[in-house]
Amino acid sequence: MAIAGAVSFALAAETLPASPLQRQIDAAAPGATIHVPAGVHEGNLIINKPLRLLGEKGAEIRGTGRGKTIEITASDVTVEGFLISNSGRSLMADDAAIHISADRATISNNRIEDSLHGIYLKKANDCRITGNTIIGTAVASNEDTSAPGDGPENCDATPLLNGPGNGIHQWSCSRTLLENNTITRTRDGIYFYFTDHCLIKDNVVTQVRYGLHYMYSDDNVFEGNRFSENAGGAAVMLSERLTIRDNDFIDNRGGRAMGLILLSVDDSLIENNRIERNSLGLSLNQCNGNRLIGNTIDSNHLGLMFNGNSDVNSFSANSFRHNLYPVEMNGDSGTTRWELAGVGNRWDNVAPVDFNADGISDLPHRELDVLGYLRRNFPPIGLLADSPALRLLRFAHQRAAIPGFNAIQDNAPLLGTAPAASATQPTP
Amino acid sequence: MIRAVDLTKSFGSHHVLKGVSFEAFDGNITLLIGSNGAGKTTTMRLVAGLARPNSGYVEINGYSAKKDGRRYRSLLSFLPQSPAFHPRFTCRQILKFYAVLRGVPASRIQEVLAISGLEDAADKQSGHLSGGMRQRLGLALLLLPETPVLLLDEPGLSLDPEWRERLQVILHAESAKGRAVLATTHLLAEWNGRANVCLLCEDGIIKGTVNPHALTFAVAEETSTPQSPAKPADAKRTETKFSSQPPRETHAFRAILGREIHASFMNRFLQTFTVLALAGGLASVWMSDNLEAIAHLTLQACLYGIPLFAMLLGVSSARMESEEWPMLFSQPVRRSSIFLGKFLAAWGVFALLLAILFVPGLFVGAPVGGTFMRWIESTGLGAVFIALGLCVGVAAADRVRALISGLVAWLLLFFAFDLFALGLAGWTFMQKFPGFWIALLMLNPLDAFRIQALFNLEQIPAETAAKAPLAAWWLDNANSCFFIIAALWTALLLVLTIRRMNRLEV
């Protein structure tokens, strides 16, 4: 029924008489530049030839409330400087403010409001999405809007009919540049699916469900982005050879919120990220061969969730401090190393024994998971997370290992807050 | 007139009094003599209402120590063997306090200062008085109310010969006015010929009377069997010109409250905490660019420091003047008033000190509502631990034991309880009823406080809520639950302490 409705809406949109701006586009030669003056211009627009569409200050393209406000089906199209609004609301029809299904599109400095998806890229390569502001229609909330039964582990993306869409949605794309975009109040902020070799840089995503919803996408680089105040946080899954560097994953709080979860992510570099004040800071599940270096995982409710099915990862120069509950483990840490080139990580209560004054404790540090499986089977046990009794147990274990508990052992824990002389960050 | 009938008193298997009976009449000085351990002081404590006999009874003018407690105590004035006072109050302040407890006009203070020769030392702190002067201050307090009965336990031990002589003259003058004076002593030679009646106490009984003019001789050979006191049926309440009514309890309570607040400000322990609180407050101003850190530190201080401090404050408040209890408890004031005055004063000063810690946070822009609520919550938590400190302070025999007991109680609530809860959580039954487990956890006021603070930070129960409505209810109402639990704990501890205090024998 819903599908039939969506199709009929699409047909209705196509039968409408072309707007003046559409006629101008249709009349333009390929490669032409159209300067669009200030004022409201009717959508929807279909751009099917290489073209530069530049909006002057105050130029708005307002959709009909059906279908895609701007649909780009040709390569080498630029859309810049517009306020774009009022797309259709059909998730089944991929309605969006800007829908791109061709290569080398440049979408810059636009403001997108009152639309389903913000920018939707479908089988589009070498696109540049920069400086856009996307404001979705969701009510700002830290509550998870996913259906009951969804968990951060499976990151179920069940579409919610007539719900909000994603900020930037990519499916089967490659070499996209996403830079300096601001996304808020959408369903997911940045959505990746089968999209490789992209650079995602300096974007800000706030007040959405998942800041980053990411699957089956390899060889991408995330740098300097900020994912904060989201219901879910950032979920990266089933991907390889990623570089996630200098990003902020902060203030993602809620029943299922996390800073950054990695599920089946292999051979990636996670470096110098700030993962702070989240319900769950960092999670690794079935992740192999990753290097996590110089990250700050501080002041979260649960600092690190580490599943024993992850192997050959390396943690070095990370800070795990002031977390209410530092580490939850499922199994032991196996072949994962907690120091690299003799440089471990910062933890609370590292024994301050440093005879050679190199800023590295001479005693190994053990981080204990006291609550163990109870955290999963009996969630209220989390109420003991910050209990002085548990702190005492952890302290005792750090000084003399208590048998029968899962624990991390860092053989070269760092002391103090500033990098020590010989505790410089190892080169990846 | 004092009438003691068949008083017995045992401490465990040691029978100190085995049936003491005597009468001490108005206008007489009655001396209770005997060797060490004969039971003189125990008899005096029973007569002063500081301890209860196992059997037998004691009356003054027909009023029973057991049944008419306040009225009975209003008829006597007691000078213990080693009178003790708050060391930082002056003689005048001490006399003023007891004058209010007795309902005596302030003009009487100057009179008794003159009688006891303390006019020049009136504004001296009692801690700076010599042993003899402290004894004279006790004498001043003895004479402050015009009661029909004066009780003195080994008076004059610390006095010089001149003042011992003057003490006897004073007592003679008082007995000549028609007051009954009962004193214990083993300084026989000094009292030779000075008393009207002399009772020989030996091996827990009144063995007989002794000629009061032949006290330097072997008294055992000169005893004669005392006359038995009148039967209880014959006892009638009599009023003399010295009969006095106890003052209104509210007046006494106000006096105690005021004195305890005053004493709190002179408490070095509290003064140290004030400095620390002020430093903490100023540090929060210094750190004003990081309000989150302030909030974190404040929470940690509330959770870790404040309960411990409040508990120590309670112990300190309970034990600080424990040496003064014999004198205080012989006043016509309910012990519960004394205790509640201590509690409210300590709690009030504690709340004020917390405000010193919290208020600077308001000035630097910390969320006002949050900070105010944290102050309220911390004050609530403080009430529980002040009550706990007072409870162990009253129950323990001395300050060291009180401190150790308080610390043990604090450790139990702080560590052992949560480990116990952790153990219970592994039990399948508990896992089926998370609401019950949370309720159990929140019975601990520290956990209730921590959980409501934690709940504001995290949303742990999101999944629990769907499965366990009771658990969700607890957590949704964590704030109210905390206050209810704190109030219940405080009330329970106060009731226990008052019951203990009423049974306390000093």
Image (cartoon, rainbow, N blue to C red):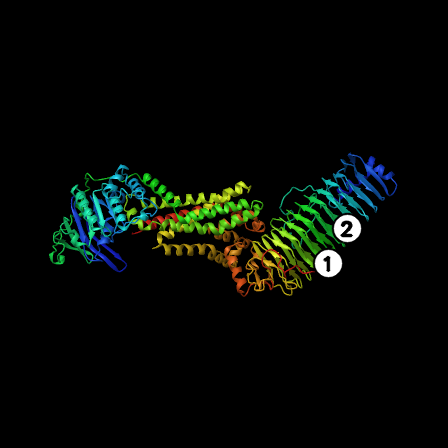
Residue at left 77%, top 50%? A176
- Residue A311 lies left or right of residue B485; in this view the side is right
What residue type is disc 2 on? Thr
Q: Is residue A39 above or below residue B345?
A: above
Q: Secondary structure at mark 2?
A: loop
Query: Which residue carries the number 2 mark?
Result: A176
Find residue B134 and report its horizontal and vertical position in percent.
28, 48
As rendered, which of A356 and B457 lies closer to the eye? Answer: A356
Most extreme residue toward the front is: B120
Q: Secondary structure at mark 1?
A: loop
Q: Is residue A258 among what the camera can see? A: yes
Q: Are marks 1 and 2 in contact (CB under 8 Å)?
A: no
Q: Is residue B82 above or below residue B240?
A: below
Query: Which residue carries the number 1 mark?
Result: A241
Q: Is residue B326 above or below residue A351?
A: above
As rendered, which of A381 and A82 lies closer to the eye? Answer: A82
